[in-house]
Amino acid sequence: MGMAKLVLQDGTVFTGKAFGAKAEAVGEVVFNTAMTGYQEVLTDPSYSGQLVVMTYPHIGNYGVNPTDSESARLWLAGFVVRERSRIASNHLSTGDLDAYLAGHGIPGIEGIDTRALVRRVRVHGAMPAVLSSLDLDDESLRRKAAAAPGMEGCDLVEGVTCAEAYDWTEGGLRGIGPDPAPAPEPRYRVAVIDCGVKRSILRLLVDAGFQVRVFPARTTAQEIRDFAPDGLFLSNGPGDPAPVDYLAATVKELLGELPIFGICLGHQILALACGARTYKLKFGHHGTNHPVRRVGADVVEITSQNHGFAVRPEDLEGGDLELTHVNLNDRTVEGFRHTVHPAFAVQYHPEASPGPHDSRYLFARFREMIVSRRESSTPCP
């Protein structure tokens, strides 16, 4: 096993052991506070362009398997852990973390002080960095890190969205936990705009009784209309929502025509379509343990989150948008609804794969919104 180095844009150098692919990667350093779910993190398109640090010190102990993948490939730029497990102990495991990263060309580094790294990110904010097991010269890596671009202004959706529309029919996984209830009938047609959608979201849409077709992010409003959906879903995805203005324009055109539900980046896109603005968080929210309060209700949901941008709360005041959920850690906007049109969104991940199931009611709420819209528009006999 060779050496690897992680060099931050502020010049800080962390030296550790290499694992995964022998390669060099540039990305923004973010930290994830989950204790499990590293494979879901690795395969989540929302981590595109990022160097992910796991705060839990022991990663890789249950190996990897096809079931836990949230997409067909790994999307993050590089992986940072305190200690990589040499033993993969789980009856579902089909491989280990080292080989998994190597097979997908993703470099990893272990053996560094991840607590010191996380503290630095918390104090100074998420910043670009270089992770390399090829170039081990500090000054060379500092120059590369200094020249690395940040996330603001970058449209990363273009790199993760599907190339063409496709149908998704698979429901929730069975045999590895409580089996999902049979999907309700009838099945309503939902158009999913793919900004980097996770498979768990698609499965829960099917379980909620939807016929799902996934569309590329640059699909036009007329192409959505041609599908004649009963509802529109805006998926999660990576990067800054502001440059994804083409999708916000499409959503603005369809607002009022279709019930709309957005998650994560989809939440931000819906906000932009409604005239709100977004901003970059200091170090983002990444993990499975974030408390969110439902406004107007004595309920706190423990949620799974993965985002680096948020909606400006002042833009929800005095207009047609109403705050519905707020983060209890930093009071950021976690959800809103449109008071005129059937549309709502949440910043966190109600599918929470992995994570708590507190927020799965939102998929049923989306169905209820569609049913209500259809019944109200049905002409009297």
Image (cartoon, rainbow, N blue to C red):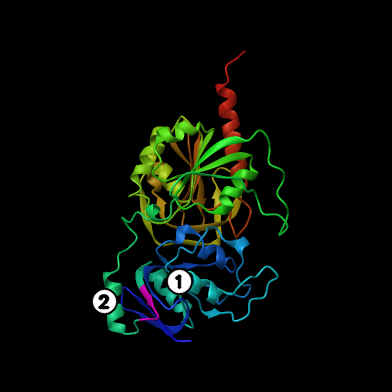
Mark identifier at residue 143: 2
For the C terminus, give its image quadrant.
top right
Mark 1 to mark 2 CA distance (whole Å): 22 Å
Could you say whether the residue bearing mark 2 is in a helix, strand or loop?
helix
217 or 311: which is nearer to us? 217
Q: Would residue 93 be found to the left or right of residue 126 on screen?
A: right
- Residue 38 belongs to magenta span: no
Residue closest to the eye, 61 or 295 = 61
Q: Amino acid at mark 1?
A: Ile
**170 is higher (above) or lower (below) than 98:** above
The residue lying at 35 percent from left, 68 percent from top is: 127
Q: Dots 1 and 2: beta carbons under 8 Å? A: no
Determine crowd level at label 1: few under 14, some 14-19, many 20+ residues with C-alpha closer than 10 A.
many
Q: Is residue 150 left or right of residue 336?
A: left
Q: Does any portion of residue 275 appear in the rendered image?
A: no
Q: Position of residue 47 (x, y in %)?
A: 45, 61
Mark in front: 1 vs 2: 1
For label 2, the crowd category at 10 Å Cα-Cα, with few meaning under 14, some 14 to 19 and many 20 or more, is: some
Q: Residue at x 72, y 58 (%)?
A: 177
Numbered disc total: 2
Position in image of residue 275 (x %, y %): 36, 39
Across and down, in percent, residue 62 comes to: 63, 72
- Judge from the rendering whether residue 156 lies leftward or rightward of residue 143; answer left or right: right
For image coordinates 43% across by 49% down, the residue present is 163
**Which residue is tagged 1?**
106
Q: Which residues are magenta?
A: 130-134
Q: Amino acid at mark 2?
A: Arg
Q: Could you say where residue 252 lies in the image, as x and y percent from the top left?
A: 39, 36
Check disc 1 and report its element: helix, strand or loop. loop
Would residue 302 be visible to someone looking at this image? Answer: yes
Precedes in sequence: disc 1 or disc 2 = 1
Predominant SS along the magenta part? strand
